[in-house]
Image: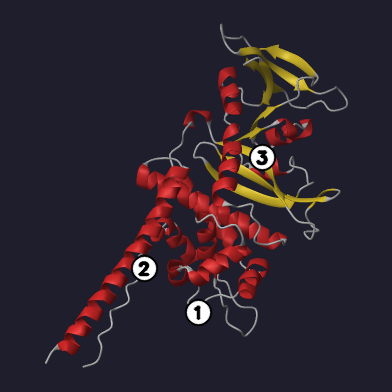
Amino acid sequence: MPRLLPTKAKYSTVSFKKLKRPLKKILKKAPQLESRCNRPLQMDFNDQLNALIFFHLEEHTSGRHLIQNLKEDDFAREHIAPEKGISKSSFFEAMNDRGLEQFLYVFNALQEQARTVLPQKFPELGQLVAIDGSLIDSVLSMTWADYRGGAKKAKTHIGFDINRGIPRKIFLTAGNDGERPFVSRILLPGETGILDRGYQQHKNFDLLQSEGKHFVCRIKANTTKTCLEKIPLLKDSIVFYDAKVLLGQQGISQTEKPLRLVGYEIDGIRYWVASDRFDLTAEQIAFIYKLRWDIETFFAWWKRHLKVYHLISRSPHGLMIQMLVGLITYLLLAIYCYEEHGESVSIKRVRQLRNKIHNESRTAELHDSDMESQGNALTQKTYASP
């Protein structure tokens, strides 16, 4: 009688599929990725997206680290890697030459979906978008990433939805490129941008008001101001100044449109904040500026726990893809943490998800082992029978 072989158990993908569930409808409408020659793609867009989400989720530190896992880790080889596997050259070719249009589409569609799922924290304050830039350490061979002599850095310019705690727009430039021009490109009419002192530019304050976009921007304490009308202060408030003003020197850099200037003091530090939001109290404007810290917290968490600044590619094309998938992974985690736990993203919940994925893989391995043991026992019993 022939030896009976156990059936190979499939690795479970329940948790990974649950994480990716918001992408199901988006991917059906995404632009198709096509080969540029007669040779079929070794890695299609879904394969590339899966691999890069897996890269960020599992805290890989390089493209080579990821490729090794795709070849040697049973779960990754069966459910993440392309069916026929992927070579190092094909992976890096895909990163540097194709897929950017598709990743941009997925990111934009996913952040719109997240905005409908996640609740707003401060609806009474309007749509708040913190805007900031973050430098990415680069290598000297990245000649496009100019920063200063002897150093190369790229820079991301990100708009962060404060109410929902998610990224909503990104641009990538060389490290020495200015940040101010991106404010108008990130904000939509009716939204309020929250900006640090580096974004102070009086002509931009006029431009934003003409475009119907709002701002709350910290300014330098020595900025020249012309008071047009003082606004009464509340007793025992942190606010010591509230007025309608023009900023800058007349005839040189003065704003054409009046704006509001709020001065307040916390822990012995005086803050001067310019805004066009006359519909709010001075205390609310001070609170809005405090919320700008949320984007700093996001940058720190994103870099540390999703390893987005560990370079996979050195080209602008490939680096932008890496940044986009880092944001896509964060958006998926934000939706997952809210739907599963009613919470914002935290490393505790991310580690819990990683452990679930690993435990599901181990369960399949144990099942394989049990099946093999049963098969061996049955074989021995068969051969021993008279």
- Label 1: how many residues lie within 10 Å, few (<14), some (14-19) or many (20+)? few
Q: Residue furthest left?
A: 386
**Res. 11 mark:** 2
State the residue position of label 3: 132
Q: Amino acid at mark 2?
A: Tyr
Give the residue displayed 48% in from the left and 64% down from the top. Answer: 27
Q: Is residue 243 visible?
A: yes
- Relative to residue 107, is residue 118 depicted above or below? above
Please state which of the two labelled residues, at mark 1 or mark 3, is closer to the viewer. Answer: 1
Q: Earlier in the sequence, mark 2 or mark 1?
A: 2
**C-alpha gap between disc 2 and disc 1:** 17 Å
The image position of residue 225, as x and y in percent, is 78, 18
Q: Amino acid at mark 1?
A: Lys
The image position of residue 189, as x and y in percent, is 61, 39
**Res. 84 mark:** 1
The image position of residue 359, as x and y in percent, is 36, 58
Q: Amino acid at mark 3?
A: Asp
Q: Find out whether the residues at labels 1 and 3 contact each other: C-beta distance under 8 Å.
A: no
Q: Nearer the viewer, residue 262 or 297?
A: 297
Q: Nearer the viewer, residue 207 or 286?
A: 286
Secondary structure at badge 3 equals strand
Residue 355 is left or right of residue 134, and the answer is: left
